Amino acid sequence: MEKRPLDVVVMSDLHLGTYGCHAPEIVNYLKSIQPQILVLNGDIIDIWQFNKRYFPTSHMQVIKEIMNLLSKGTRVIYITGNHDESLRRYSDMTMGNFQLTDKVVMEINGKMTWIFHGDVFDATTKGSAKILAKLGGHGYDLLILINSFLNWCLKIMGKEKMSFSKKVKNSVKKAVSWIGDFEQTAAELAIEKKYDYVICGHIHQPQKREVVTKDGSVTYLNSGDWIENLTALEYAHNEWTIFQYDAKDFMASTTPVVTMERKLPQLNVVTDEIALFIHSLALQS
């Protein structure tokens, strides 16, 4: 597949290191694009739920593809989220084309764009409530596992896949109201700061809409996630669009899984050094 040249790509909520992460799809997508700037807008590695025993090859391949883009000249900006908040102690670190930060403001074709993860607006990720959020994260991971098994059964029966968590979120009025409040708060703050665009992640709801108040207007965008929606934001030809992953578009480029008859000694995909580093961050958070 020929790589698509793009000005800016924003991805968030990959949650590498969890069962719900669609790592093969992320790899396919990253292999299909050549952006000038790649913004990883939080919750990329899920340090909250990191387990050394679960970091499969496909998850490591995501990191490899990001490194490949870096080596080919793409500027990569990693914005910290709540699930990888332990990295915030290293914020404003820059190494070559790589930058780690908590938020960023870009001027793109004369338009000011404010990008941050969005957990700053979420009281459930602060203080004592954070413990419950982490426990809830493990329950969410179990729900994803059950959902994956169900979808496997549905596929065999020739029926469409379904998402438990997405249906629950969309059917609970309180959740819908909270998402609306989140978007409105982000937009109003951006209008106050005189920005043209505000881009968030965190709530796993891809979105692009104009928000107008008595003080002005702003375009609010959300990059969604790679657990349920498999979406990203792309900027090209002076316009932001929501990319929606469709497996049919990547059938020819999907890398086949190679199996070996003779079993090799078991090796951890994540080196001990990386695992210890991430584990220490999780303990200190």
Image (cartoon, rainbow, N blue to C red):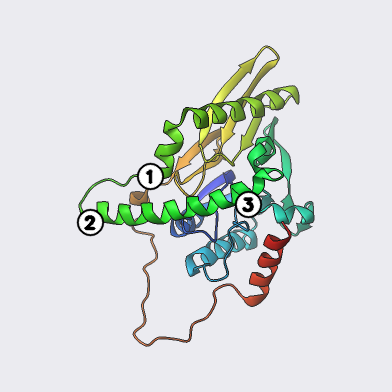
Q: Tag 1: Cα neighbours inside 10 Å, few (<14), some, or many (≥20)?
A: some
Q: Tag 2: Cα neighbours inside 10 Å, few (<14), some, or many (≥20)?
A: few
Residue 226 or 62: which is nearer the viewer? 226
Residue at 26 percent across and 55 percent down: it is 153
Q: Is residue 137 left or right of residue 263?
A: right
Residue 198: x and y in percent read 65, 32
Q: Is residue 181 above or below residue 160?
A: above
Residue on which the image places disc 1: 163
Residue type for callout 2:
Ile
Taking the view exactly as shown, the residue that stands out farthest to the top is 214
Residue type for callout 3:
His
Q: Quadrant of the C terminus?
A: bottom right
Mark 3 or mark 1: which comes first in sequence?
3
Are the residues tagged 3 and 1 within 8 Å (C-beta)? no
Mark 2 or mark 1: which comes first in sequence?
2
Residue at 42 percent across and 32 percent down: it is 171
Q: Quadrant of residue 86?
A: bottom right
Residue on which the image places disc 2: 156
Residue 275 or 247: which is nearer the viewer? 275
Secondary structure beneath dot 2 equals helix
Secondary structure beneath dot 1 equals loop
